[in-house]
Image (cartoon, rainbow, N blue to C red):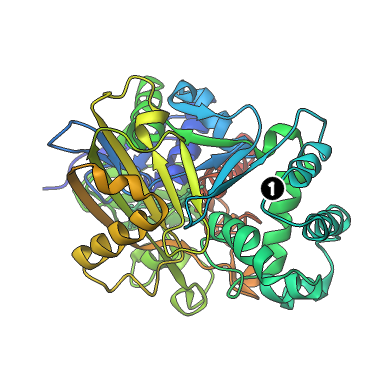
Amino acid sequence: MEKSIESFDVVIVGGGVSGLSAAVYLSNKNYKVALVEQNRILGGRTNSFINNKFGDEVDNGQHVMMGCYFDTLNYLRLIGAIDGCYIQQKLSIVFRLKNNKEFKLQASNLPSPFHILTGILRLKEFTFSEKISLIKVGLVIKNINTNDNYLQNLTVEDWLNSLNQTEKLKKYIWNIISIATLNESTKNVSALLFLKILKEIFFGKKSNSAMIIPRNGLSKLFVEKGISFIEENGGGVFNQTEITNYKIKRNEISEVSLSNKVKLSTKGLILTIPYYAIKNNPINIFYPKIDFNKHFISSAIITIHLWFEGKWLNEKFVALVDSPLHWIFNHSAIKEDYSQSRQYISIVISGANLLISKSKSEIFNMTIKELEKFYPASKNHKLLDWKVIKEKRATFSPTIGLDKWRPSAITKMENVFLAGDWTDTQLPATIEGGIKSGFIAAKLFEEKVTTY
Ligand SMILES: Cc1cc2nc3c(=O)[nH]c(=O)nc-3n(C[C@H](O)[C@H](O)[C@H](O)COP(=O)(O)OP(=O)(O)OC[C@H]3O[C@@H](n4cnc5c(N)ncnc54)[C@H](O)[C@@H]3O)c2cc1C
């Protein structure tokens, strides 16, 4: 049976960080928001659940942010969740090698960009000429014009080769940064996007390069207080449902019907669903006629969560050099009140398309063997529990030429706007890209509605 029509200022589709940020922004401006999500839980690619054995919040995948995630930090402040983050004062990363050795990249207290330059000069793993070579690349990045056409056709690898970066520098530094920021190794991705990000991270404010790590599970950090914020401001969250039909009047959407038979009248629509969910969806008419599945290639991330008896790692997080495992995150050190008797760590494998078809136990076995090469002490600690989470479509791969296929927030309809980490944000597929896109779409909606 059809239910009666509920009236909202705006309907936002998709409850990931893009949809949540658009909804929170507009709720804060006193618009009555309806947020529509297909799944039972909101959060999309940022969600968490509780581990039955220890009661820990476990993320679908470990997420890291940086000081230059300006919109993300604004979102977290707005919903009152910023305390759920560990925020470094300045960049400091430990790089671990297989022979029990490690080196640290640590920014100094000098103003930007000298904070990083001094950090590079202090790297004990590299020769003087390697350090000078890194600094030269830094100067190139600082002065590069990202509008130069030639950059559009270069991979990160081509670009690094053009600057005579040695295999060691690529392996120890550049590949790790590429994997961390673009979820792909240097060989597959566009130099243009890479350079834009590096410029922001290393040549913006000193705090831009600091790492930010969630202390709370992703659902607690991004979702729960976001939902409360929307509801406390008069909005509604409709989960386990999707748009099945809509009404258009004079090139404007005026009503949507949901699969749960609810109808929502609205002054506008913001769509934040991922590129792989558009085909065969009734709302695909609002998108440009592009074969998204052809142009957008997904890149996987695998997270291996491990619980050990006792502790063998002190650092909050560590980058592994020359390993299929890329990062280790130590929740026992990130969460100050974590139990002293066990260690909960998450290991991240980014750009994981080649491993994604392996079984979870194969991935687990490979991880344990590899971990023991980097941290022989881990062998002496009983493993209490483990979980492997494979996210096949974690991000899009920022391949050469992809920019021209990323749609802007504006559509051919007067009051329909697009968002999502994959839309044209000039950022890679990140939380910051998603939240930025949500804010852009919300601001466009606001401009339109006030002109009514
Ligand atoms: C394992 C993993 C690790 C990551 N690591 C990092 C990291 O370290 N740092 C970082 O910044 N980023 C990271 N990312 C990327 C980041 O999570 C994403 O860029 C971001 O969450 C995308 O948000 P979104 O809202 O654009 O999309 P999504 O989170 O995909 O949200 C879209 C929502 O739309 C819903 N939906 C789809 N179709 C419909 C429909 N028809 N009707 C209603 N709802 C619909 C979906 O269910 C989903 O909830 C990682 C991602 C993964 C998976």
Disc 1 secondary structure class: loop
- At a point 68% along the width and 70% down the height, the residue shown is 156
Q: Which residue is at a point 22% across and 51% down the rendered structure image?
A: 387
| The image quarter in which residue 224 lies | top left
Q: Which residue is mark 1?
A: 124
Residue 197 spot, x, y in % from top left: 68, 53
Q: Look at the picture and state if 111 lies above or below 154.
A: above
Position of 160 relative to 420 (above/below)? below
Q: Position of residue 232 (x, y in %)?
A: 37, 20
The x, y position of residue 237, in whole percent, is: 31, 36
21 on left or right of 344: right
Closest to the observer: 144 or 452?
A: 144
Q: Along the horizontal axis of the image, is 110 left or right of 52?
A: right
Res. 390 visible in picture: no
Residue found at x 18% / y 41%:
3
Query: Which corner quadrant of the image does residue 106 belong to?
Result: top right
Kind of residue at disc 1:
Lys
Q: Is residue 243 above or below residue 150?
A: above
Measuring 47% from the left and 28% from the top, which residue is drawn there? 85
Locate residue 436: give its quadrant: top right
